[in-house]
Image (cartoon, rainbow, N blue to C red):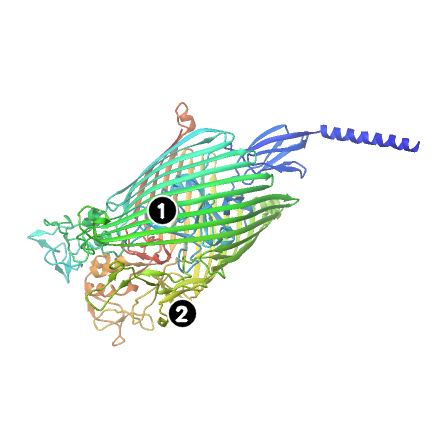
Amino acid sequence: MKLKHVLKKLTSACFCVVVLCCNAYSQTLPVKGKVLDIKGAPLPGATVKIKGTSKGTTTSVDGSFALQAPQNATIIISAIGYNPQEVPAGQSISVKLTENNQSLNEVVVTALGVKREKRVLTYSTQQIKSDEIQQSKDPNLVNALDGKVSGVQVTTSSGTPGSSSSIVIRGASSFYGSNQALMVIDGIPVNNDETGNLNQGPGTNRLADIDPSIIESMDVLKGSAATALYGSAGAAGVIIITTKSGAKDKAPTVNFSSDFSFEKALLPQVQNKYSQGNNGVYFDGVNQKTSTSWGALMDTLKINGQKAPVYNQMKEFFKTGTTRNNTVSVNGGNNNNTYLISYSNFDQKGTVPNTSFLRNTVFGKYSAQILKNLNTTFQLNYSNSQNYRLPEGYALESPVWTIYTAPISYNLQPYEDASGNQRLYRYSRNNPYWVLNNIYNKSSVNRFLPTFTTDYKPLSWLTVTERFGADVYTEQDKYKEAAGSVSNPNGKIIDQTINFRQFNNDFFLTAKKQFGDFNTDLILGNNVYSKYTQYLYAVGTGLNITGFDNISSASNITYTENHYLQRKIGFYAQSNIDYKRFLILSLTGRYDGSSVLSTDHTYYPYGSAATSFILSDFFSPRLSEVMNFAKIRVSYSTVGNDGVSPYSLLTPYQSQTASANTAVRNISFPYNGQAGFLLNTTLGNPNLQNERINEFETGIETGFFKNRIRLEASYFDKKTTSGIIPGVTIAPSTGYSGTTVNTGVMRNRGIEALLNVTPLKTKNFSWDFTVNFSRIRNKVISINGDLPQIGNGFTTIIVGQPYGTIYGTRYARNAQGKLLIGTDGLPYADDTQGVIGNINPTWTGGFTNNFRYKQFNFSFFFDVKKGGDIQNNVDGYGYFYGTPKVTEDRGPRVVDGISAATGQPNTISVSGQSYYQRINGITESVIQDGTYIKLRNASIGYTLKPSWLTGTPFKALNFSVTGRNLWVYAPHFTGGDPEVSSFGASSASQGIYSFSTPTSRSFDFSLKLTL
């Protein structure tokens, strides 16, 4: 009976449990839905939670989700960078989230292309969006960042179309090689080498192959804590370039834009009062030749009884440049795929005749959802560029040199006499108009950038990504100098072919999981990288057939081939943990192996640790009304840099030229069918290891009055150790002249600040402005043992001095710093050379204003650099020639100084010609302060109201006018543009202004429309 009673009670209890469960189940319902952005594209990884509970899920790759929710429940949907929404539970939900426009909550692109909320970052980064890139109207993407990002210095090399620009983040990190930032497009590193020039002057940095119109944003990762995942290639900073994409569930949209601009050269001032000649005596340039313009006063000069004509050499030579840029794109998509196709034609004609840069690009991107949790993206960027340039700088063939220094009394045209010979007013340089028709340097580049990305989401919190990308281009360069040239009377042809292949593969896992109050995300991956470059170089001299620009017409041909292969493999991990979204910890580690390093040091580890604390989460409501956001961040990182040229571990053989004590000299091999090779005079070092860069960074980010005022500030301290120093002299008894060592030590310290303010914002009017500021200090601590200095192109690396010190001939001075004057009444050079300048600016800054009134928009941008010395060789050589504007004052003078003979103030009078031709040999005389203020960009535009376009095929229509380099104030610089580096973008070419094609002031007219 007891058992029966127990079973009866147990049955009743079970029945009650079943009823309660059924009742509970009847009060819940399955909820399915999709989360999209405002354009209709899916938002994977969005958080979907039941309000008042900890239950929830995240959306899959296609933005879909599913969960069980109680009846009458409220669903909260949120995503990084978007405003959250609350919706009532239902069986089918579709939500479009709007972007959060507050920059402190914006989404930025970080290493590996991973998007993260700026609020939780533990390092400094800055983003430039598409409209700012387009607004710059510059064909080179690098220049779009000029003056807009704190801690970043961009330097243009020349005004020749297609010329290179350098971009350095937080100062130089390496003693030699490239100090430029790594360029990454959609997660794939791309090559940005400078190529294309076979004579003096700059080439083209290969980022010029990219069409700016396809760029969605550029994110600048400055410190090592931000770039550690990119391995040694990211040691100098990283620029993350994100391209545009199509949109799901969107009908095809056609966008067209057309730009046309005029460019006017920014020229140095020259004297226009005195003729060709010497000591006031006129030379006609025919019977009496000279390179100098120390002749007669033009106002009083008569030729054959007639007043002498004055020739404005620069005005006659330099033309108005033009640029045409037309772009058309189509984008759209359906429920499972998106697409974007773009074509651009860019055609620039330079201010120097016969110089141009033509670029045709095709870009396509296609994304498809293969399965519910599998998404793929394939994209291809193809470009073809044609660049025509002329020699620049010191080259005897440089037409700019001759034009800048040509006498105003001599007519350079026609450039040939009746016999077909050059008309020359001097002996050692070509007529610049002859150069235009008989010398050229052209290059043709075909480049392919394919990328394939697959994202697989086996679990709601786990994503597996495979990304493969390549950078492949072939470049064909030709330099032709016709017979009759002053420098190569028999003529010369150079043919060069560059074959470049770079492959990059990343396979990584991304895990995002919430554990109570902790949000975690983890990246774990592997990288494989390979780079191969081949150079085929042929030189032919003695051209026998006029007008036949083929090297087979040369009498003598020499041919060389060089090729380089470099491989890397890396393993990396990063974890980000935040507690209640106010305390964030980020840890990064990477283990790299490089083929260019010693076998004992092939693999090297490095990493970073960073944290940030969001103070504003603890502010009182009253304080939060004023300061709504405040974050402090601190990081420390150590990264490696394998900046060693391939095969530096070995001592390779190279082709030789022999000299004999007989009548036969300079025998080139192969000779009579016999090849000749000797070991390189630079001894290989089999013990080379990676450079090490340790960096400490701290900063603060704040927002006031609902982010109407936003301020970011950073301080960094970066130290390079085991710096790679090539060419260190060793004992001649070894049989070698030098070797490469790992001994350099250098430090960079600096502060960066960025201020964004929106003073006014109404329905019809808004005004916002941005100010950025950078101050960086560099110091070389040691080079190699007690070695005090070593050369580096136009600058010198000196212990105890900044990297970028100008070292050379200086004035002789007494203990008080007064000039010492010789018995001839002229200053003279000190017996020893010394430090005469520093190319690094004291500080840099930028000031951007944007105004909008209804359909009108107006913006202007000032760029400022304080300090930074420039060696002005245009004036330096001009002092001898008598061409700079300052040499118009030619009267007698007493040079201020102390007589070296008597110790008394100098009283000896000298002529202007004697004075300037004396200081021509003293480099210190042409070191000028490069301080400038530029109105770099100003633009005004008008967008038609959508209602006005009703009934037309247009969805949007915009007109704009933009000016670049409209005003330049450089009070201490006498050249055309103080922001120039005449010999290219390398670290060894900075701080020099020397007869490069001048940069330009331009006006651009633009039309944009959408169908």
Q: Which mark is residue 787?
A: 2
Query: Residue 69 or 743: which is nearer the viewer?
Result: 743
Q: Quadrant of the N terminus?
A: top right
Badge 1 crowding class, 10 Å Cα cut-off, few under 14, some 14 to 19, many 20 or more, is: many
Q: Amino acid at mark 2?
A: Leu
Query: Residue 191 or 603: which is nearer the viewer?
Result: 603
| Residue 637 showing in the rendered view | no
Q: Would you name the residue on which mark 1 appears?
A: 936
Rendering coords of residue 167 (x, y %): 40, 51
Given the current orientation, which residue lies at the most extreme bottom position?
Answer: 902
The answer to which quarter of the image holds residue 746 is bottom left
Query: Residue 22 or 11: which is nearer the viewer?
Result: 11
Horizontal relation, residue 765 to residue 631: left or right: left
Q: Residue sitting at 40 percent across and 26 percent down?
A: 949
Q: Which mark is residue 463?
A: none
| Element on which disc 1 rests | strand
- The vertical placement of 626 against 40, above or below, is below
| Element on which disc 2 rests | loop
Rendering coords of residue 540 (x, y %): 24, 53
Q: Judge depth for marks 2 and 1 and give the one in front.
A: 2
Query: Residue 360 or 580: which is nearer the viewer?
Result: 360
Q: CA distance from mark 2 to mark 1?
A: 42 Å
Q: Residue sitting at 50 percent across and 47 percent down?
A: 111
Q: Amino acid at mark 1?
A: Arg
Q: Quadrant of the C terminus?
A: top left
